[in-house]
Amino acid sequence: MGSFSLMHWVIVLLVIMLLFGGGRISGLMGDVAKGIKSFKKGMADDEDAPAAKPATRIEGQRAPEADSVSATEEKTKA
């Protein structure tokens, strides 16, 4: 009583075929297949790409002062 028999599944498939039609279902399955292919291709591209190296830290150097005015800023003010 809790599970469907083979006859129940055949009836369900027939109702789905009547509602959506054969062409629409095959189109949907083709779209699903294209999506899976592009997903696999994207995953393969990610594995082939080298990982970005972390930025190296430079010891002993100070960052430039924010208050200093560059030559280009002086020209735009004039």
Image (cartoon, rainbow, N blue to C red):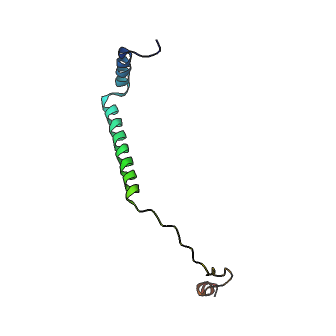
x and y percentages locating residue 41 in the rendered image: 35, 51
Residue 43 position, x and y percent, is: 40, 51
Res 32 quadrant in image: top left
Position of 75 relative to 28 (above/below): below
- Which residue corresponds to the image point at 39% horizontal and 47% vertical from the top-left? 39
Is 59 on the left or on the right of 40, as rendered? right
Q: How far from the left and from the top, in percent, is residue 2?
A: 47, 15
Q: Which residue lies furthest to the front in this view?
A: 59
> Which residue is at the far top?
1
The one nearer the camera, 33 or 49, is 49
**Residue plotted at (37% across, 43% down):** 36
Looking at the image, which is closer to me, 12 or 19? 12
> In the displayed structure, would residue 55 be above or below residue 49?
below
State left or right for residue 68 relative to residue 1.
right
Quarter of the C terminus within the rendering: bottom right
The quarter of the displayed image where residue 71 is located: bottom right
The quadrant where residue 5 appears: top left
Q: In this view, does 39 lie above or below 60?
A: above
Give the residue displayed 60% in from the left and 78% down from the top: 59
Q: How many marks?
A: 0
